Image (tube, rainbow, N blue to C red):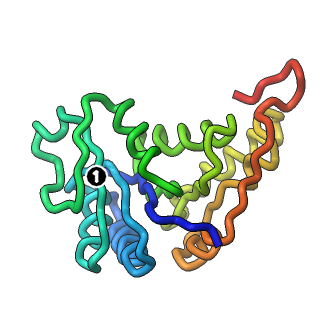
Amino acid sequence: MRNIKSLCVYCGSNSGTHPEYAEQAAAFGKRLADEGIALVYGGGKVGLMGVVADAVLAAGGRVIGVIPRQLVEKEVAHQGLTEIHVVETMHQRKTRMYELSDAFVALPGGFGTMDEMFEMLTWAQLGLHTFPCAFLDVRGFYTHVAATMDHMVAEGFVRAEQREGVWFGPSIDALFDWMKSYESTYAPKWITSNTVGA
């Protein structure tokens, strides 16, 4: 069983248009606390970020936030976290979240969520880490993302092994079962000597 002590969640600073997004974020946070896994996230009190953090804290778990100073100054930082790391830039934020984490999960979110998660997928593709990366597919939110990844494989830009190493699904139970048994499927990024999947 893979030993996951802390898990990084990327998710929206908005709550979305359907109550199920917040409901599943809260359920995921409670499950983290029940499993004894610390939450690492972007440090905000708003949107799904605030929901998942509050759920972990309410269930007695640990929450570590990483937030740029400019967002603290805009008063969106969560004030009740176990730890908060204030950094100067978004790049430092992403790096620090990576350093603190043993796994990465995307809940529904927008551009920032995609940016952060795809950076971790790229680092895995390059062999810079071997941690599990997963998308909790609430209400089919990530169905098209999964299809796009499949298309990347079909068109020769991503190895099948790299795609197979990324989990998609709607079940929190299934996600945790997958993470506990996860083994890296790392394969060299380059598909041929003169073709790079970027």
Query: Nearest the camera: 78 or 154?
Result: 78
Q: Quadrant of the C terminus?
A: top right
Q: Quadrant of the N terminus?
A: bottom right
Q: Does residue 44 appear in this view?
A: yes
* Residue displayed at 55% across by 42% down: 120
Give the class, few, some or many, for how many residues have Cα within 10 Å of label 1's Cα (few <14, many ≥20).
Answer: many
Q: Is residue 160 above or below residue 127?
A: below
x, y (%) of residue 36?
Answer: 41, 75
x, y (%) of residue 10?
Answer: 42, 52
Relative horizontal placement of residue 30, taking residue 137 as reference (left or right): left
Query: Which corner quadrant of the image does residue 148 belong to?
Result: top right
Q: Is residue 58 above or below residue 161?
A: below
Relative horizontal placement of residue 172, taking residue 94 as reference (left or right): right
Which residue position holds label 1? 65
x, y (%) of residue 102?
Answer: 52, 56
x, y (%) of residue 16?
Answer: 34, 58
Dot 1 falls on a residue whose secondary structure is strand
* Residue displayed at 20% across by 60% down: 81
Q: Does residue 19 appear in this view?
A: no
Query: Nearest the camera: 148 or 52?
Result: 52
Q: How many numbered marks does the figure carry?
A: 1
Q: Amino acid at mark 1?
A: Gly
